Image: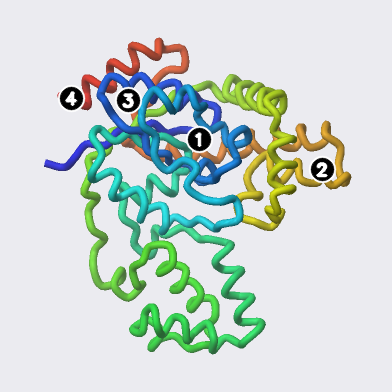
Amino acid sequence: MKKRVIGIVGPTASGKTALSLPVAQRLGGHIVCMDSMQVYRGMDVGTAKPTREEQALVPHHLLDILSPDEPFSVTRYLDLARPLLNSLPAPILVGGTGLYLKALSRPMDFGRVSGDEALRAKYHALAEKDGPEAVHALLQKADPITAARLHPNDLRRVIRALEVYDLTGIPLSAMENEPPPESPWDFQLYAIDWPRDRLYARVEARVDAMMQAGLLDEVRALRDAGVSPDCQSMQGLGYKELWPVIEGKATLDEAVSLIKLRTRHYAKRQLTWFRRDGRITWIPWDSDLSQAADMICRKYEA
């Protein structure tokens, strides 16, 4: 019998933390962060990271594990999350990074591996600097079977094969010849089902609350600590829009309006992603969270 793993997922500002805490408390569970930005230290306000008080209620994992100048990828997330799901009692995934959930729960083959623009840009830059042969040589080391059938000048496919390897740790040639493995876990997934207008209102209220809580000062402190605006962490919503403000290149009102707009768009994309996942049980937005938590715990223990 596969180990059960609860996932509380959904778009930003949908109430994942508020639902996950009573579930974890009642089950004696551990929360495993499933957020690509909450892994960074010093980025608390803009990532809506659980507060210290919330973290004190139940054990949390994969929060504050990286410096803001470190890169992070789905491959590294898998390397960190998989052992936790295997070892922790009642692990509860909480977050809105759908790619992480997909990678954990539906092992990826070539057709399912999403693209990574940062990786592609890195390999294109290498090709421009040292020629396509240099990129092909990297593929030769990672996946010699695929490299043997691709000409170095077929840069698009060479880069795609490297991208697949970097994101999954599995050569493309192996994926093409074998069916993807089944997930070792039984996922029980939940999300709170908000009407879109109410969700957008929550998004805007959250941005206002972040500003009141000192998001601008948080971005300024990161800059003063030597974090570059080009770092992966600084591409997160709220950070990339406020950086021009502290450099005197944009007004605060302009930045806040842009954060709200982009966060609404991000929430819409998340909704579209999660709506496609038929495994998710959608909890009505006006449900009593205590009763919803009871339902989740009963199903987990059944």
Disc marking residue 246:
2
Please tell me the numbered disc located at residue 24: 3
| Mark 2 residue type | Ile
Q: Which comes before the other along the chain, label 4 or label 2?
A: 2
Marks 3 and 1: which is nearer the front?
A: 3
What is the C-alpha distance between the residues marked 4 and 2? Answer: 50 Å
Q: Earlier in the sequence, mark 3 or mark 1?
A: 3
Instruction: Give me the C-alpha separation between circle 4 and circle 3.
Output: 13 Å
Check disc 4 and report its element: helix, strand or loop.
Answer: helix
Who comes first in sequence, dot 2 or dot 1? 2
Say which of marks 2 and 1 sits in front.
2
What is the C-alpha distance between the residues marked 2 and 1? 32 Å
List the residue tagged with mark 4.
301
Amino acid at pointer 1: Leu
* Residue sitting at x 48%, y 71%: 160
Direction from residue 277 to residue 15 in the image, left or right: right
182 vs 138, nearest the viewer = 138
User: Hey, what amino acid is under mark 3?
Assistant: Ala
Is any atom of residue 193 visible in this view? no
The residue that disc 1 covers is 271
Q: Earlier in the sequence, mark 3 or mark 2?
A: 3
Q: Which label sits in the foreground, 4 or 2? A: 2
Give above or below for 73 relative to 185: below
Alpha carbon separation for disc pair 3 and 2: 39 Å
